[in-house]
Amino acid sequence: MPPVPGEWKGICQQGQDFDSSNCNRKLIGARFFTKGHTVASPSDSHGHGTHTSSTAGGASVPKASVLGNGGGVARGMAPGAHIAVYKVCWTNGCYSSDILAAMDTAIRDGVDILSLSIGGFPLPLFADSIAIGSFRAVEHGISVVCAAGNSGPLQYSVANEAPWIATIGASTLDREFPAIVQLGNGEFLSGESMFPGNEFPSTTTGGKKGSEFCFAGSLPKVKIQGKMVVCDRGVNGRAEKGQVVKQSGGGAMILANTAINMEEDSVDVHVLPATLVGFTESLRLKAYINSTRNPRARIVFGGTVIGKSRAPAVAQFSARGPSFTNPSVLKPDVIAPGVNIIAAWPQNLGPTGLPEDSRRVNFTVMSGTSMACPHVSGIAALIRSAHPKWSPAAVKSAMLTTADVTDHSGNPIMDGDKPAGVFAMGAGHVNPQRAIYPGLIYDIRPEDYVTHLCTLGYTRSEIFTITHRNVSCSELLKMNKGFSLNYPSISVIFRQGTRRKMMRRKLTNVGRPNSIYSVEVKAPEGVKVRVKPTKLHFKQRNQVLSYRVWFISRKRMTREKLSFAEGHLTWINSQNHLTRVRSPISVTWKRK
């Protein structure tokens, strides 16, 4: 690594088992933020921070694997980036005051990107400490990237909805860890696991169940000694269920998805031979168990398989839009890899993170929008290094307008058994190579966000809480008649009685001078779309041209309170036809 940047103002804070000698040219800052905790240190006690920071900026590590699974070179998105960590989460959660304090300190320290793999449920922006802290960061030119949350597939579940944040959902990879269940009747059930099957016997017989969720103390030892136990997903942790089975004398476990999880396949490095089967397979499994007095099965571990499955697809757990508090902005923004991600792991924890797990590894597997977020943070760092003068909005626009909407087989990205919609994947799947050269960008200044808050009907004191600016919305809106936020995606809401909407957008040419772009529109069903002008001729770099787009509803209000449609608007470079600047469109009809 090159020396620490001269403008860096951060420190390596001393704590338990941690001092400045733990920092180096890679890890250039480490601080902790804590109220009322007896043990305080920036070192990682849960693994989550190590895993996410190495995903964003880890250097290349050859021969990385998780106990032999998923072998190869491990490398973060921006391997040349310096990393500073700010620890705000402890065993009893993450205090809003600590999050805000850490963000303020990071701004003063001189960071370029803030990556927050934190996010629960949607909150009004004036009550959301991450939204407040990130507004301050964006005012200082810092890009803020956050996890969308793991409450999918419920609608309106997306967290971190502020328009100045890049909100990231999770997608799957085309890498699998097959662990097939062979039933006594000769049938096979496909499952997945990262248990190192080559080190242990992979045959165990039995199949009588204890408690369906395998809670601690719920499995009678007499019944399950040496047996394979079927545990339903839900309530307690997946790896924890395996620990309960092992402590109760069970020999192996089949983790069965319920209707909530469907076919979602988050794998674990279980403490005993175990596999996870999807909901369809779990129904077949239970039908077999109920069909015989002596059900038998064995698990066959298949190692690592790449390229066989369709990917990327939207992760089942990835939180969904529309935004609960601000449906005028389409969220999540994009999706990125977040299922079965292998990344670095601290030496004080086993690969499952369970206190009973005495194994030690340098890498482990985790799933969540927490894993998707640092992928985009690292990509944002790469874009910033290529274009150091770009604003956070420009960086975000580059990622949104170049995102992929097809998977590696050229078919639409899927969400379960149907093509993914905009509320599941936003603009699509992030594409780092295309994002570096987006051609055109939608730029936004901090003051535009303030005007946007006025259009949402926020009070003066609510806006002050978020922005620390004392503004008169009536004056701002008078000066900005017909204002619409220059967001790279478009969200249209037709309330009862409105049939026409007009929006303005401005595009900045960050590509070659003398570039001509023509518009292509796929109108949402039930909506006529008109764009004026239909061609944009940029004579020089950084020139700004605007266009207007009219949405005319042709749909009669139905009895349903809500209905949705989607489409897209794309500006295509007329000279090379390769540069495509795509904006997803979502349309909502609301009865009230």
Image (tube, grey):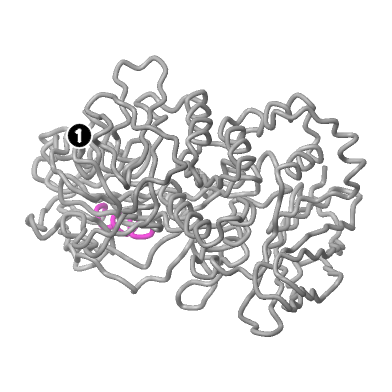
Q: Is residue 474 above or below residue 56?
A: above
Q: Please state the extent of the stretch shown in magenta in the rendering.
A: 280-290
Q: Position of residue 396 (x, y in %)?
A: 60, 55
The answer to which quarter of the image holds residue 408 is bottom left
Give the residue drawn at x 71%, y 47%.
445
Residue corresponding to mark 1:
219
Asked whether residue 474 is drawn in magenta, I would say no
- Looking at this view, is 396 or 250 the one in front? 396
Q: Position of residue 463 (x, y in %)?
A: 74, 30
Give the residue drawn at x 58%, y 33%.
133
The answer to which quarter of the image holds residue 586 is bottom right
The answer to which quarter of the image holds residue 32 is top left
Q: Is residue 87 above or below residue 114?
A: above
- Looking at this view, is 4 or 550 the one in front? 4
Give the residue drawn at x 44%, y 52%.
372
The answer to whether residue 315 is left or right of residue 201 is right
Dot 1: within a 10 Å radius of its alpha carbon, few (fewer than 14), some, or many (20 or more) residues? many
The answer to whether residue 148 is left or right of residue 587 is left
Q: Position of residue 246 (x, y in %)?
A: 14, 40
The answer to whether residue 544 is left or right of residue 49 is right
Q: Quadrant of the C terminus?
A: top right
Dominant SS in magenta: helix
Residue type at mark 1 is Leu
Q: Is residue 300 above or below residue 98?
A: below
Q: Position of residue 277 (x, y in %)?
A: 31, 56
